[in-house]
Image (cartoon, helix red, strand yellow):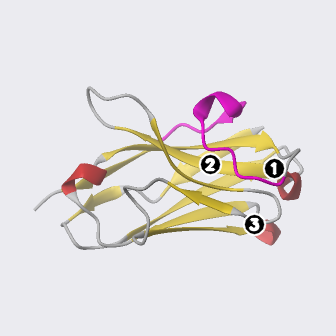
Amino acid sequence: VQLQASGGGLVQPGNSLRLSCAASGLAFDDYAIGWFRQAPGKEREGVSSISSPGRTFYAESVKGRFTISRDNARNTVYLQMNSLKPEDTAVYYCAAVYDYSGDPPRYARSYGYWGQGTLVTVSS
């Protein structure tokens, strides 16, 4: 299983970015995908996740600003990030887990496969 996160970069506050997580080596339709982030000196935190049938979870800090979606034909999950803030600065990771329940897992310990991370920097 391979997960490739991409789309990070340097943006000004208030702007947008779209992250992509491309998966291979798994039956993508059957997997939940989660996005996590880790800022310097801080613990990793869950940002958003999407289950196999498309149910979603968002951390309170990103609700109304971030949107997660999946394209099963492309084996890819997207994280659209709008109204970015400096506190969104972090390395963003995507992760995958076989979806037994249909609910999007929100904790890192639930996930077995991880991508390499992409850096998002929000700064003026």
Q: Residue at left 31%, top 29%?
A: 42
Establish if 70 lies above or below 22. Answer: below
Residue bounds of the magenta highlight? 102-117
Write down the quadrant of residue 64 in the picture.
bottom left
Q: Are marks 1 and 3 in contact (CB under 8 Å)?
A: no
Q: Residues within 10 Å of mark 3 (few under 14, many from 20)?
A: some
- The amino acid sitting under disc 3 is Gly
Q: Is residue 11 placed above or below 108 in the rendered structure?
A: below
Q: Is residue 42 left or right of residue 52?
A: left
Q: Position of residue 89 (x, y in %)?
A: 28, 49
User: From the viewer's perspective, is 101 left or right of 63?
Assistant: right
Q: What residue sits right under mark 1 in the picture?
A: 31
Helix, strand or loop at label 2? It is strand
Q: Indicate which disc residue 54 carries.
A: 3
Kindly identify the amino acid type of the residue bearing the numbered disc 2: Gly
Query: Marks 2 and 3, Cα distance to the nearest angstrom?
Result: 12 Å
Q: Is residue 38 above or below residue 74?
A: above
Q: Residue 84 at x, y = what percent?
A: 28, 65
Q: Which residue is mark 2?
A: 34
Q: Quadrant of residue 57?
A: bottom right
